[in-house]
Image (cartoon, grey):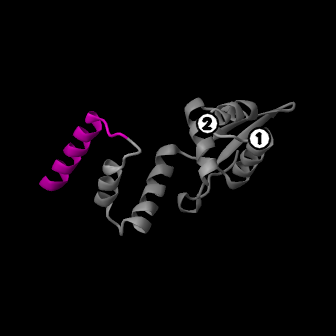
Amino acid sequence: MRMQPPLNTIKPTESELEILSILWEKGEATVAEVHTLLSAYKKTGYTTTLKLLQLMLFKGLVNRKEIGRKHTYWPIVDKNNLSIGLTERLIGYLFNGSPAQLAITAIQSSTFECSKEDLIKLQALVDQKISQ
């Protein structure tokens, strides 16, 4: 079993994050399954998907089992821990250490819609921080 590298050294590429998202949702998948799901929104070749998964195995992002010629991969990087680490880096690099500025930018984004439920949760967090 592969040991997971320290979170501060894990720097997945955009393509690796796309594959990780698929694996986090499915739990585990063969190269063909990952390729099919990835190809639904991104033009990529089967060998490219295979090579990315092999690199991710080397980097310690996934693990695999081999049954004949069929390779099944699963994530060994925890989604929540990785998202915290990447968010902290993003806040540090782009928002001068201000999580509030990240939240403001995210809410103002026209690319993603913020649900009323999410806004209520955010308001509760803001109220909690203010009362501390």
Most extreme residue toward the right, as rendered? 68
Magenta region includes residue 120:
yes
- Location of residue 104 in the rendering, given as x and y in whole percent from the top left corner: 29, 54
Residue 70: x %, y % from top left? 81, 31
Residue with the mark numbered 1: 45
Q: Main secondary structure of the magenta part?
A: helix
**Closer to the camera, 36 or 57?**
36
Q: Which residue lies furthest to the left in this view?
A: 131
Image quadrant where residue 72 sits? top right
Q: What residue type is labelled 2?
A: Tyr
Answer with left or right where residue 65 lies relative to residue 107: right
Q: Does 82 sit left or right of 66 as displayed?
A: left
Q: What element carries label 2?
A: loop
Q: Name the residue under label 2.
A: 41
**Residue at screen point 46% across, 62% down:** 89
Tell me where the magenta segment starts and ends, as one range.
113-132
Taking the spot 25% from the left edge, 41% from the top edge, the residue there is 119
The C terminus, quarter of image? bottom left
Residue depicted at 86% across the width and 32% down the height = 69
